[in-house]
Image (cartoon, rainbow, N blue to C red):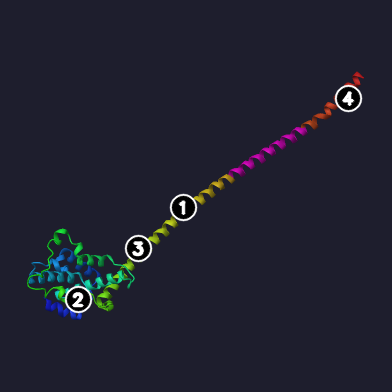
Amino acid sequence: MSDSEVENSESVGVSRPTLAQVRAVVEFMQKHPDLAHKKLRVGMGRGKFKKIWMELAKTANSVGGAVKSSQGWIKYWADKRRSVMIKKRQIEEGKLRGRITIMEQKILDLCNEKSLSPKKRGKVKEEPCNGGDGDSLDGFLSKDEEYGDIEHKHSVTENDERHLNIIDKLVEVMNQQAAAMNQLAHTSLCNSKALERVAEASHIQALAVDRLANTFETISASVQDVRNAVIGIDYTVKRCYPVMTSQRTNANIIFG
């Protein structure tokens, strides 16, 4: 698809890149830091510069979402970089509450000369790239735009940023909810184990009561046996006692 066809589709399609497209652009910039950092474009001709940006546009458009030409993605990257830098400055000055997201930090690292590797820092010069810098993304950034008024937060890129922040917060809330559900499941498991122990203790207590009842029943039967034995002895003594009395009486008569 040529840039003219992309521009036509861009006019009627979605203009706001998706989160997946933002990630694709950042990952592409990490592979080609010479696009993100002006001072690394030493020796890069205009043709190569356009070719790399066309490759980025093809990569971002293939992800699904907004369809932009290479110039459209250059403009998007310039706006995105500017909005992140403004947000960082506002947070540092206390004018804005919030934090820099992981994606925003990656963009800041790409734009920060100190984050470059020593090998790439050695290539940094002040001269512009061959063929001029008219087609670069810095053509879209004037000094006033880059450090302008905070009204840029009402632009489309700021809306994108708020959208990404909402997604980050939503993911964080979902993680907290998952942790809470995990804790609830753990608590339910502990309660279940406690109930099992209570049921087991109740069963042991019931067995002990049953054994105690059997013991009392055995004692009662033994007492009954003793009672019957005593009654038998008493009956035997009473039956035999008159005979012994008559024998003593006869003996007294004989020896009297």
Mark 3 neighbour density, 10 Å: few (under 14) some (14–19) many (20 or more): few
**Image point (16%, 65%), residue name:** 33
Q: Residues within 10 Å of mark 2 (few under 14, many from 20)?
A: few
- What's the residue at 61%, 43% (across, down)? 212
Q: Position of residue 95 (x, y in %)?
A: 32, 73
157 left or right, relative to 228: left
Distance CA(mark 1)–CA(mark 4): 84 Å
Q: Earlier in the sequence, mark 2 or mark 4?
A: 2
Could you tell me which secondary element the residue under label 3 belongs to? helix
Q: Where residue 132 sits in the image (x, y, percent)?
A: 9, 73
For disc 2, the marked residue is 143
Q: Which mark is residue 175?
A: 3
The picture places residue 130, in percent across and down from the top left corner, at 7, 70
Q: Quick one: label 1, few (<14), some, or many (20+) residues within 10 Å?
A: few
Residue denoted by label 4: 249
* SS for callout 1: helix
Q: Amino acid at mark 3?
A: Asn
Work out how far the residue at label 4 is from the one at label 3, CA to CA, in angstroms.
Answer: 110 Å
Tags 2 and 4 touching, CB below 8 Å: no
In the picture of the structure, the residue carrying the numbered disc 1 is: 193
In this picture, which residue range is highlighted in magenta? 210-235
